[in-house]
Amino acid sequence: MTPELHDAGATSRELVLRFSPPADRPRLQALFDIEREITTSLRPDLDHNVAHTRLEWWSEEFTRLCQASPRHPATRALAEASLTAGLSLPDLRGLAEATRIDLATVAFLTQAELDDYLALWADSVFASLGQPASDRARALGRVIREIELLADWPQHAHRGRLYRALGDPPEAHEPWVRHPLGELESRHLRARLTELAAEVRTLAGACSVDELPTRAPALLWATLAHDTAVRLRSRLPDFSITRFEPLSRTIRAWRAAVTLSRGRLPSALR
């Protein structure tokens, strides 16, 4: 979620934190605090050299986290919460690399390049929601992250970040930074959102009943992402989903959490 949208109702992270099982919340709070700290490097008012210095420090901090010697209060809290829960220490180095790519406003020529970028977040942040992280969980994280980035498209595009395969040689950037998007571009994004919503259901729906207790935060996040993809699809080209129905979205998150607590998948994922 970009800084400009922090006031647009509760974010997915806030809802995941609010409605996840109490035992998971200290770890999730620390994880989201870290992600918020590192993405501060993308603030448009921050000097570029300062941003790179911050990223370098966090890269070193994530290495220290892997070595069980973190320094920042949030990484120390994450390490403590992980060990208390009997989990291994998260490897968040991919988060620093993904943020470095964001800062560089790299253009993705192929879907494979975009998938590799999405995997940096999925294999670090999303994989830390529940362990051990399976290949299916990592794939689900990639899909969720792409949906998030599409939901924030106007803000990202304004900063020169286009999270879509542009081809080789790349398509012209100009049609993709207009707001609202043109008919052709909107049609392309609608088609992609349809694919992503189906992938969320396929990947999340493959979880067995035995997995639900340890996958609750990830599946709650998947429910929210599916909801975003479906609603955003009908809201293009103006992207009003980013400020749409915050109360009803909270209620849907609560219902999904209740369903998961009863050992069943939310209806959106079945």
Image (cartoon, helix red, strand yellow):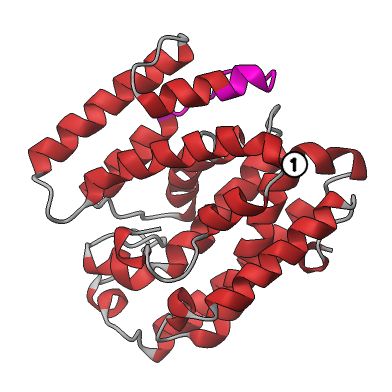
Res. 48 image quadrant: top left
Q: How many marks?
A: 1
Residue closer to the observer: 161 or 223: 223
Residue 17 spot, x, y in % from top left: 58, 48
**Residue marked by disc 1:** 215
Span of residues in magenta: 81-93
Residue closer to the observer: 174 or 150: 150
Whether residue 197 appears in this view of the structure is no
Q: Is residue 156 above or below residue 209?
A: below
Q: Is residue 64 above or below residue 263?
A: above
Residue 177 spot, x, y in % from top left: 27, 75
Amino acid carrying mark 1 in the image: Arg
Q: Is residue 82 magenta?
A: yes
Horizontal side, residue 10 vs residue 47: left or right: right
- Which residue is located at x 44 percent, y 61 percent? 149
Residue furthest out toward the front: 22
